[in-house]
Amino acid sequence: MRNASKKAKKKIFPDTNFSGRNLLLSIFVVLTIFLNLLLHFYLIRNHAQREVIHSNALVSSINVYLSRLEEASILANTLSFSSSEQTDRALSLIKKLYHASVVFIMDAQGDVIASTPYDAAGNTLKGFNYSFRDYFKKAIEGTSDLTAAVGVTTREKGFYYSSPLVDNQDFSVTHVLVIKLPTDGISDILASDTYIHALATPDGVIFVSNNAFLLDKPLVALTAAQEKNLLDKGYWQLKYDSPLGIKDSSTSIILDGTRYYLSQNPIIIPQWRLLILSRSHPLVLTIHHLIFTLLLILIFAIIFWYLLKSRSNFTKIREQDAVIMQLRKNNIQYHALIEHVPLAIWTADFSAIKEDINTLHAAGTTDFETYFSTHPEEARKLINKGKILDVNLYSQTLYGVNSKEHLLQNTHALFSTQPISSVIHQLATIATEPDDLSGTTIHSTIDGRELQLEYHWIVPPGHEKDWAEIFVILINITPQIALQNELLSSKESLRLINKTLRHDLINNLSVIHSALKMNQQSINRSMLAEAREKVTKSINLLKDMRQLESQSQNPHGLSIFELREVLEKVISSHTTIPISIRGTGEVYADSAIYSVLDNIVSNAVKHSGTDRIDITVDQNQNLCIVRIVDYGRGIPDEMKTAIFEEGFHYGPSGRSGIGLYIVKKTIERYYGSVHVEDADPRGTAVVISLRSYK
């Protein structure tokens, strides 16, 4: 029984150990398979995520490369295009900044009026018309556009960015700026990866690719009408040998007997897409990993997972380093652009202004325009609480200072000429619409020159409530204002010339015509005398018009004139009565000063009935006063101001009524004034005030 029992035990325990080992092995195998399956699905999901991250990173790189051109809209409207030389420099600067192949400007009709060279021979696009291009049509309507095409003239592919250039006065679109980037930049981005990439147009043709086999091939078979449309545009050099067979819903493609996984991603250019072809198809990976799972043990799976995670982290770190390097490069470029762009750009702290405005709001103030108009001293005090923290280099040039520190220490003194009405408007707008503040104002340079400025206020994100950091952009519009005033003055002068000639010459010629007609039958000497008088008046009128025309063509360029020398030359032609001169002085004027003084002296000699004329010149620190006194019949009080008005004439000897009007306008152009007053004991004194040179 004992032996039987031992045999039974020997039989039972080995079976039990075998079953236990099998159970443990089964549990280990099941656990290994289960864990590997879990790992498998994790890797599949991680692979899909990496594919998405990979495609997004590539699309992001392309979008960042192309979206840089959006900055050109701001830059283009700040550069000066007042001369062909400045325009060429501005276009060359833009070409250099954006690594463009060609930069050109079109007028409102689509004609290229300025262009950089597009090849080594120095050829430009100047004189060509591209009004048929969609990017021109959109830009002339006021919308920037980014598209791509093969150049009609250059026959080279490129990406075209068009931006409207607007008039600073009425903000109408006057010109279109076009920047063409070569495909090299996109090609470099596509070539930086081992996958096959292709950039497809809305027409379904490969525009750029890192695989020569795909280049210029249609995605699907094109109809005859589609082929003709593309060829008529002159955009594509199509390859008709077998389309690629890629539809919108396609997820894979076979090239040279190899199946590739296909992803299609939109980019920043509307209706364009990026195709990414990779050999790692999820289905192939699934089958491979299922077989691999049966062979791996848990430790290998852990090691594989660890290595995979380490590789992923290394890739992310490398990508982050690349992004950081690009950000540093962009920061250097943006800093250089901000420092040297022809705009005054300031960083300011308006937190103290914000606090006071909040206090006024809390006190119930709603109409800030009225409040500051009734408290102008408070407005001036409040605007001076703003602190300028930093300025760019162009601000030094604009205000004529030697350093940023000098400008920052003298900001309040430089802005003292700012009109109180402008200050009130700025504060009222800040208090009610702080996100949209722009307008015009007046500052002064360090040497006292007046600056007409257009300002724009930008609140960066994060400072909407405290205004601790504000960006202020100042555009110098002084030349534009001066040009506008000059054009208005010229227009008024031409209107005056036309009106006077039309009115007075017609009247004079009518009298002459009547006199000649009457003398055909019998000689009437009084009529002939009147005709001669009208001829003389017409000649004098034409002389006045020539003088006014000369003044309208040269409104600036004042020089220093010694008044005694001018007066002695003027009176040398008037010998009928004695004329005396006492005193001397130097003033700012031009050659028209001779005509001004001669006109006044001639009027006194011919129309006042005086027997002598006395002229005195008194000069002080700021003004030089000239008094031309006659002792004739005088001028009635009600006519003392009217004689300088356009078209006024008095008495039978009066001419066109424009001589003294020209005198007044000329003296005002010298920044002076003129008026008449009674002389003692009788007669008239014409008093002229001019800027003194001393």
Image: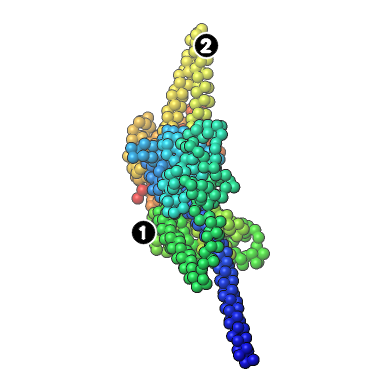
Give SS at disc 1.
loop
Marks 2, 1: nearer the viewer: 1
Q: Residue at x 58, y 82 (%)?
A: 14
Q: Nearer the viewer, residue 158 or 439?
A: 158
| Amino acid type, mark 2 | Met
Q: Residue at x 62, y 92 (%)?
A: 2
Q: Residue at x 49, y 36 (%)?
A: 240
Q: Is residue 487 above or below residue 455?
A: above
Residue 522: give x, y in percent of width and height: 50, 8
Instruction: Residue at the far top: name it.
Output: 521
Residue 361: give x, y in percent of width and height: 64, 64
| Amino acid type, mark 1 | Asn
The residue under label 2 is 518
Display coloring: rainbow
In the rendered structure, find residue 315 and report the number of the disc placed on it.
none
In the rendered structure, find residue 402 and report the number of the disc placed on it.
1
* Earlier sequence position, callout 2 versus callout 1: 1
Q: Is residue 273 left or right of residue 605?
A: right
Instruction: Residue at the far bottom: name it.
Output: 2
Q: Is residue 536 left or right of residue 119?
A: right
Give SS at disc 2.
helix
Q: Nearer the viewer, residue 302 or 50?
A: 302
Q: Nearer the viewer, residue 263 or 371?
A: 263
Residue 595 visible to an observer of this rendering: yes
Residue 456 visible to an observer of this rendering: no
Q: Nearer the viewer, residue 273 or 278?
A: 278
Q: Is residue 237 above or below residue 349?
A: above
- How packed mark 1 is, by other alpha carbons closer than 10 Å (few <14, some 14-19, many 20 or more), is few
Residue 471: give x, y in percent of width and height: 50, 59
Q: Is residue 121 above or below residue 474?
A: above
